[in-house]
Structure formats: C-alpha cells, structure tokens
Amino acid sequence: MSLGRRPPISEKLIADLSREFAGQVRERVPLAERTWIRVGGEARLYLTPTDVESLRRMLRRLHEWTVPVLPLGAGANVVVADAGVSTSAVISLVEYMGKIADPVVHGSKVQLQVDGGTRLSSLLDYCRRHGFSGLEFLAGIPGSAGGAAVMNAGAFGRELSDALNRVVTCDVRGEVHSWPRQQLDSGYRCGGVPAGQLVIGLDLRLEPGDPEKIEQQMAEYRRLRRQKQPYGLPSAGSVFKNPPGDFAGRLVDAAGCRGWRCGGAVVSMKHANFITTEPGATAADVFALIDRVREQVRKTFSLELEEEIIRLGDEYPLAWTTEDKEL
C-alpha cells in the first residue's frame, strides 16, 4: 500500500498514545520550525521518546495500528511538503535522546558512545573540550549523529564511517539491533543502515588530541564552509549528490541555473548546489525549482542528478514503514 493512499492517523490512536506516553506525544506540530530550510506543513502526530524503552513501546503500538513512521533528526537535509504529514507518525530523538556516555580510553584509542539524537554541534563541542580527535571535518555541518550515520556525512575527504565502530538501531517492531561497521555497506552519502531501522546509538573510535589544535582545525573547516556556502541562510544543504567524477554544483552552474528562482526559493549565487529560501517561500517553490534545475542539467549534459535532500510528506514514501515487504 502506498503511503499516499493511507487514511490520516486515527483520533483513537492519538488519544491512546497520549495517555500511555504523557508529555511525549504532540499533535499538529509545525515542521518548518524544525527544519533548516524553514518551509513545509505540520505533523499530525509528533512523538519525542525520552529513552530507548519508551521508543520501543511507541514503535510496537504504531506497528499494531500499521502506522508508518518517519524519523526526523535535526532537519538539516529535509524539505517537508506544504501539506505536512498526516498519515505517518513523525518521531524525533533530538529533544531527549541526545546523551553522550563516558568515554573509554584504550591507549591511543578512545571509544565514545553517543545517542542517535545527539546534535553534531554538541558532539563536536564535547570532543573539543575533552581532546578527542577524528570528527573535526564535521564542523559546521548541521544535523544529528543518527542522521549523519544514515547519510554517512562527510567532507574534505573524510566520512563518518571512518570513525565508526558500530551502529545501534531499533526496527519498526521495537527490536534493538547492533551493526558492526563491517556489516554496513557504506559509501558516498550512504551509511548502509538497513531499511526499516532507526539509528538510536553510535559507537565511535577516536584518538586523544590537543584541544587547542582540534579547535583550530574545526575553526578552519567552518571558515571554509562560510567561504564557499550560503552559510546562515535557510537551506537544506546540498540539493544533489555529486555524480562520479564530477560535482553537482559545477553542473548546475554550467547549465546556467545559478540565481534561478521559483517564488521564494533561489539557487544560491554562492554555491549552485544549494537552494535558499526567502520569507514567504513554500515547499512547492523548492520542489519546483529542484525539478527545473534537474531538467536543465538533463538537457544540457544528458545526466540525471540524484537528490541528496529528503522530501518528507504523505506523497513521498520512505523505506521506514510497517509494511512487511520493507522490513
């Protein structure tokens, strides 16, 4: 069954969940406020579990009602449709499940366990203060640890998988799984996390380092991002993945799309693989502009660009679903 054909979430389920998970269930939550591009509609049902056990129970209840689940991290690379999400439950771990465990030091190696909802900015600040090196290249990248694991976030020739020991996930039936790095088929913008798995924890391997040097390296990476990207403007990061041997931004620019606009959505003059939004912009503006740019690149270079952003909404089904065929 397509997510788009599903009925809205029932009032009875919402009432039952509200009683069982007091304070962790909200209705009609604006999602534009929870994404970096600042457009889109609301979530009919928005869940913020406080710990793994409450998350597992939530997922079991949703599975009983065959309600699909859409995970929302820090909203860094997500564009929510203007109609919002009414047929799926949106689950966010960043509000409560963002803890960092005490590190374990083995000589020249540091083992660090973090919750999937940990914001990257908090993780990097922790590493800086404690002198743990290995994640400096993530400085300036918004998002959560779980989202970074799913996307295998990377920059400057490094990827998160380089510092990963294992990923801990929870499936749609509430069962917890542990995935050693060797079992994850990670690659460019793909962490290899199996479909139907929500990342709830990461086990990282880092190295002791000089906090001052770590901060200097992070500051340099942030400077480079501000220099090359529309830093500080609403966006969802890179719109398209880089095709093999080339850069999406170069192709978009060479196709003449730099500065294009649809309504309040604009192809950045600073970096053509970014779309920024102005006050009053809609998700429809963003989607229309993405489609126009992709078509122009296709006509110019006979090349199909693949989106790196995630479209979120009832009409955009994801792999995270309660349907057996996707488990």
Image (cartoon, grey):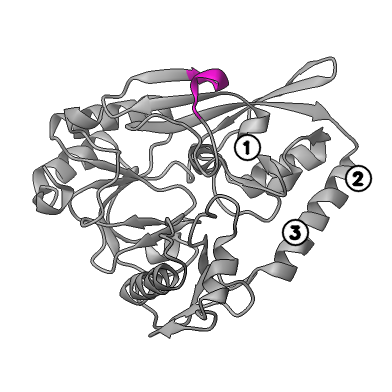
Q: What residue do we see at 75% from left, 38% from top?
A: 127
Q: Quadrant of the N terminus?
A: top left
Q: Quadrant of the C terminus?
A: top left
Could you tell me if residue 234 is visible in this image? no
Q: Amino acid at mark 1?
A: Leu
Along the viewing direction, whichever of 190 and 7 lies nearer the viewer: 190
Label 2: which secondary element = helix
Along the viewing direction, whichever of 26 and 105 lies nearer the viewer: 105
Evaluate if marks 1 and 3 touch, with contact meaning CB atoms under 8 Å apart.
Answer: no
Q: Within the magenta stretch, is there residue 107? A: no
Label 1: which secondary element = helix
Q: Which residues are magenta?
A: 179-185
For marks 1 and 2, give the one nearer the viewer: 1
274 sits left or right of 213 in the view: left
For marks 1 and 3, give the one nearer the viewer: 1
Evaluate if marks 1 and 2 touch, with contact meaning CB atoms under 8 Å apart.
Answer: no
Residue 222's label in the rendered image is 3
